[in-house]
């Protein structure tokens, strides 16, 4: 999941810029001595325990507008000693009964009111550790990138405590230095910023204040000189046991399909203060949370599923590539879901000096039934920080099988041109040998990207050139054989209205040459959106578009709208609808059609501990020539949780798919003490409207249980 502190749209612009050095806006470095007496983390600001702290009270908004006085007062504090960083917030509220807070599982509190800090321990403005806490002490964490977005895939070990009171709420937390990386040295400079989200007013506030014309968010953080941080070598051992028992229907009877018990061992060693080595034997790549159902008919490209397996998550942000614009075909050079079930793996991630980031993975996969059951994956990433938030980097990926391989090598970079503008790029070459006939294929992928933004406008241009023979077996690539120019322009308005906090008008488009057919396609979206109180947004869009498929051009024009709102602190609604032209993707006989796509969701939280969510996804397709409905596809998903305390929760998911006439039901009991120390017990079944007549399956009015599974996992994190 990515938490967007700053509204960033990925698209680009090659235009003239005002070259103002970002350093003109830099804050002076503060010296903060080590605290002689660390505070107690109990959710109480006891008298005297935060004396001498770096204190911020001058919070300003950066959403929905910049530099305004917030509706609520906030005080934030920072202390440190040789082993820990300490943070505290006093969040005042004129109506505490309207504070949105839930007793949720870890990383599931982003729709609540919350506070957070971002700390850049290297003073490079490349990324920062984000530690977020809601009013009840529920944690969220991750890495903030240069765009101001937080990738919450990583989990760190730290302590927090929060509580509501008559004045609002208080949060305190402690971050052990063993959980993060930092440079060596008697005195180092870190960068720090405080944040607060207020759901009912749609406000996000910060200290120091953040402005779009003063560079990246990380460059506007407060530099602080700290002294005497101790390096304690991190050594972690994480043994895990996973057991699963699965049954499947066989001639009308449920029979055992698979029964496995896996033992895994993962180890982590801190080589230095800023470089970590991970190794694993039979890594625990079990996935506790099942993937939500997606429409899987009439697809031109494979579906994308996000990574949830713990081994891959730490340092994952280092592998992101620069240069992409919105909906770029080359999504990632490393998509770890293609590594299905490794027998062993190694990972190195961290820093070589303050300016150099490195990450490497080697894994030997286990893919029974494949042409080569044990491919080897090798990935290496290097990034060198330049001035401000600029960097230059290199990438190498390889998937090796018997008699063949796919390898990609190249470079990418990002350059801050002025406080309001930046440019980035990537250039990769692929080298592939087919294991069957030994045929060699080489290809390239080039992307150029430019962005300029202020309070009142956003301008973005991007260009991609991907050859027909470019191939990346370690990543996620939708389409090859194209040259594509993308453009986006947004104008932002801030009316003096209590209802409309901001509205945007924008145009987003791309124009693509299909180099296989030498035909052109285009996409043009005209849109207006309104930002309202209650973290609400409504958006209307018109689309003029076509698409080239199998050397034919098909119409895809249409219209749509989106809406979401936190209607009350207990009720959240969202909806999406789009009607456009569509294509039936049959390589032998494609044809023009029209389709409706809709999504709607409702979340209801009657108490701090209990939450219900229902989501509906719908898609249909009609052949345009005779108006015949070819298919309709509906997925109804219900997600329900009861959080007994901050460590233990119960969850039940029910999903119905009308296309396959199938129900799935999954239940889970989960105990997470800290990341790594967990116990999961799960049970699931699938039901279909069929019956066995003695010789074959046939449709039925009644549901038959066709699959059943039991899942158990326990792991324990040992840390020295």
Image: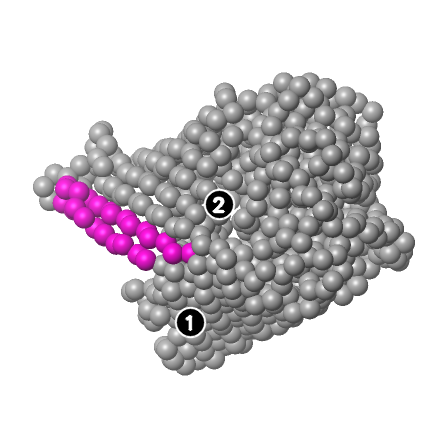
Looking at the image, residue 469 sits to the left or right of residue 667; the answer is right
**Could you classify mark 2 by the number of other residues whose Cα lies within 10 Å: few (under 14), some (14-19), or many (20 or more)?**
some
Q: Residue at x 14, y 42 (%)?
A: 253
- Horizontal and vertical percent for residue 152? 57, 47
Q: Give the residue at x 66% y 63%.
A: 447
Q: Name the image colouring.
A: one colour
Residue 691 drawn above or below residue 22: above
Q: Label 1 crowding class (10 Å Cα cut-off): few <14, some 14-19, many 20+? A: many
Q: Is residue 112 magenta?
A: no
Quadrant in the picture for residue 566:
top right
Which numbered disc covers residue 698?
Answer: none
Q: For the residues labelled 1 and 2, say whether their Cβ atoms are less than 8 Å apart.
A: no
Q: Does dot 2 land on a helix, a strand or a loop?
A: strand
Q: Position of residue 114 (x, y in %)?
A: 64, 34
| Mark 1–mark 2 distance (CA, rounded to whole Å) | 32 Å
Question: Is residue 497 visible to the viewer in this orientation of the structure?
Answer: yes
Q: Nearer the viewer, residue 411 or 327?
A: 411
| Residue at mark 1 | 376
Q: Is residue 252 magenta?
A: yes
Between 326 and 369, the one lying in front of the other is 369
Depth-wise, is mark 1 or mark 2 nearer the camera?
Answer: 2
Q: Is residue 500 left or right of residue 628?
A: right
Q: SS class of the residue under badge 1?
A: strand
Task: State which region is magenta.
Answer: 238-263
Q: Position of residue 72 (x, y in %)?
A: 75, 26
Q: Which quadrant of the figure contains the N terminus?
A: top right
Answer above or below: position of 187 versus 174.
below
- Image point (37%, 78%), residue name: 402
Instruction: From the image, tell me which residue sits under label 2.
Output: 674
Check the image and report above or below for 363 versus 175.
below
């Amino acid at each position: 999941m990515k938490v967007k502190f700053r509204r960033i749209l990925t698209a680009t612009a090659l235009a003239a810029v005002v070259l103002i050095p970002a350093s003109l806006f830099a804050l002076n470095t503060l010296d903060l001595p080590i605290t002689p007496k660390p505070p107690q983390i109990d959710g109480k600001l006891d008298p005297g325990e935060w004396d001498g702290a770096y204190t911020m009270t001058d919070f300003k908004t950066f959403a929905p507008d910049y530099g305004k006085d917030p509706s609520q007062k906030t005080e934030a504090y920072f202390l440190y000693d040789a082993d820990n960083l300490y943070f505290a917030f006093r969040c005042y509220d004129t109506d505490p009964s309207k504070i949105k807070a839930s007793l949720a599982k870890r990383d599931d509190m982003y729709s609540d009111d919350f506070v957070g800090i971002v700390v850049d321990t290297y003073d490079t403005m490349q990324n920062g550790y984000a530690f977020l806490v809601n009013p009840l002490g529920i944690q969220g964490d991750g890495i903030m990138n240069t765009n101001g977005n937080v990738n919450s895939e990583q989990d760190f070990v730290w302590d927090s405590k929060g509580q509501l009171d008559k004045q609002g709420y208080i949060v305190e937390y402690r971050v052990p230095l063993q959980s993060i990386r930092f440079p060596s040295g008697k005195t180092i400079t870190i960068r720090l910023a405080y944040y607060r989200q207020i759901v009912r007013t749609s406000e996000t506030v910060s200290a120091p204040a953040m402005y779009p014309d003063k560079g990246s968010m990380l460059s506007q953080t407060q530099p602080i000189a700290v002294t005497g941080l101790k390096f304690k070598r991190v050594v972690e051992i994480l043994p895990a046991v996973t057991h699963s028992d699965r049954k499947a229907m066989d001639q009308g009877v449920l029979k055992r399909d698979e029964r496995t018990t896996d033992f895994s061992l993962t180890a982590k060693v801190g080589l230095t203060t800023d470089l970590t080595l991970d190794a694993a034997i039979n890594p625990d790549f079990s996935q506790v949370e099942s993937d939500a159902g997606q429409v899987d008919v009439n697809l031109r490209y494979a579906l994308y599923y996000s990574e949830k397996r713990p081994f891959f998550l730490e340092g994952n942000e280092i592998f992101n590539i620069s240069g992409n614009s919105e909906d770029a075909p080359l999504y990632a050079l490393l998509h770890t879901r293609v590594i299905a079930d490794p027998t062993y793996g190694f990972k190195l991630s961290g820093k070589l000096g303050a300016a150099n980031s490195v990450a490497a993975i080697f894994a030997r996969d286990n893919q029974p039934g494949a042409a080569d059951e044990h491919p080897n994956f090798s990935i290496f990433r290097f990034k060198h920080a330049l001035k401000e938030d600029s960097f230059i980097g290199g990438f190498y990926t390889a998937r090796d099988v018997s008699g063949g391989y796919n390898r990609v090598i190249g470079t990418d970079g990002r350059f801050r041109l002025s406080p309001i503008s930046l440019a980035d790029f990537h250039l990769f070459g692929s080298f592939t040998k087919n294991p069957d006939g030994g045929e060699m294929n080489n290809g390239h992928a080039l992307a150029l990207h430019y962005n300029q933004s202020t309070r009142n406008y956003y301008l973005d241009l991007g260009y991609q050139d991907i050859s027909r023979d470019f191939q990346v077996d370690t990543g996620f690539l939708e389409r090859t054989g194209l040259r594509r120019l993308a453009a986006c322009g947004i104008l932002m308005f801030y009316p003096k209205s209590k209802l409309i906090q901001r509205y945007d008008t924008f145009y987003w488009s791309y124009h693509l040459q299909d180099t296989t057919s030498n035909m052109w396609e285009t996409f043009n979206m005209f849109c207006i959106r309104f930002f309202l109180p209650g973290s609400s947004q409504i958006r209307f869009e018109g689309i003029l578009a076509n698409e080239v498929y199998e050397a034919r051009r098909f119409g895809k024009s249409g219209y749509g709208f989106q809406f979401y709102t936190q209607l009350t602190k207990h009720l959240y609604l969202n909806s999406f609808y789009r009607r456009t032209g569509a294509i039936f993707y049959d390589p032998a006989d494609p044809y023009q059609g029209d389709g409706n796509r809709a999504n709607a969701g409702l979340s209801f939280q009657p108490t701090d501990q209990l939450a219900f969510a229902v989501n509906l996804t719908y898609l249909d397709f009609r052949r345009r020539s005779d108006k015949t409905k070819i298919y309709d596809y509906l997925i109804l998903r219900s997600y329900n949780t009861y959080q007994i305390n901050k460590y233990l929760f119960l969850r039940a998911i029910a999903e119905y798919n009308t296309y396959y006439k199938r129900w799935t039901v999954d239940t889970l009991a989960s105990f997470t003490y800290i990341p790594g120390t967990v116990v999961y017990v799960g049970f699931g079944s699938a039901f279909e409207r069929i019956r066995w007549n003695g010789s074959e399956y046939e449709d039925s009015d009644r549901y038959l249980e066709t699959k059943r599974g039991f899942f158990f996992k326990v792991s324990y994190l040992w840390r020295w």
